[in-house]
């Protein structure tokens, strides 16, 4: 079971985890990652950021990477929620929830999905700073983190 949503509204992490795991006794681990808008970047104050996306394409691209995670790891469920619009420090930006029988698979799949979302998902981010607004470029460190997943990983059998 997988869910991909792009929305302007905030999300409730506990409610999303409960929705994914309700009635499931085959899930032994749930990994969550919540990205939150912070008030500083590279030593400069950030008043807000605006996230833009291409509707339809962004959901399809994220769903494609969720499917890739499901091929790589034995997952019982995945939820990815990414917000768009203007966000201020302290607000939620993104949620990734992965459920599996084993913690290693849940952690690895969540990390894989976040590395993709951070570097290759079709979102554009503009930061509002005291010296004006600017579009944010990808960072080499983020690209390197995502590149490590380029090699196909054989799926681990859930019985292992």
Image (cartoon, rainbow, N blue to C red):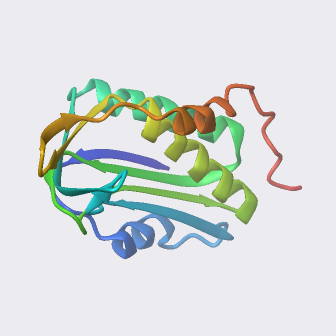
Kindly identify the residue that appears in the image at 34 percent across and 73 percent down. Answer: 15
Above or below, 3 against 92 in this view is above
Q: Position of residue 108 (x, y in %)?
A: 67, 51
The quadrant where residue 159 appears = bottom right
Kindly identify the residue that appears in the image at 53 percent across and 38 percent down. Answer: 142
Please give left or right for residue 82 compared with residue 76 in the image.
left
Q: Position of residue 40 (x, y in %)?
A: 29, 59
Above or below, 35 against 51 in this view is below
Q: Position of residue 64 (x, y in %)?
A: 48, 29
Q: Position of residue 157 (x, y in %)?
A: 83, 47
The quadrant where residue 46 appears = bottom left
Kindly identify the residue that appears in the image at 67 percent across and 67 percent down. Answer: 26
Above or below, 155 against 109 in this view is above
Give the quarter of the figure containing the C terminus.
bottom right
Taking depth in this image into account, of 38 and 40 the one nearest to the observer is 40
Above or below, 58 against 22 in this view is above
Residue 123 can be seen, yes or no: yes
Taking depth in this image into account, of 120 and 48 the one nearest to the observer is 48
């Amino acid at each position: 079971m997988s869910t991909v949503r792009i929305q302007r509204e905030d999300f409730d992490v506990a409610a999303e985890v409960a929705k994914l795991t309700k009635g499931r006794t085959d899930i032994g681990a749930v990994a969550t990652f919540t990205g939150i808008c912070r008030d500083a970047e590279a030593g400069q104050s950030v008043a807000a950021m605006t996230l833009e996306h291409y509707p339809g394409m962004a959901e399809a691209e994220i769903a494609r990477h969720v499917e890739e995670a499901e091929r790589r790891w034995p997952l019982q469920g995945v939820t990815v929620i990414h917000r768009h619009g203007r966000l201020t420090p302290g607000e939620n930006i993104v949620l990734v929830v992965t459920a599996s029988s084993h913690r290693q698979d849940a952690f690895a799949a969540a990390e894989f999905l976040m590395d993709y979302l951070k570097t290759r998902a079709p979102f554009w981010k503009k930061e509002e700073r005291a010296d004006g607004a600017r579009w944010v470029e990808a960072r080499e460190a983020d690209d390197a983190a995502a590149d490590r997943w380029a090699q196909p990983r054989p799926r681990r059998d859930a019985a292992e």
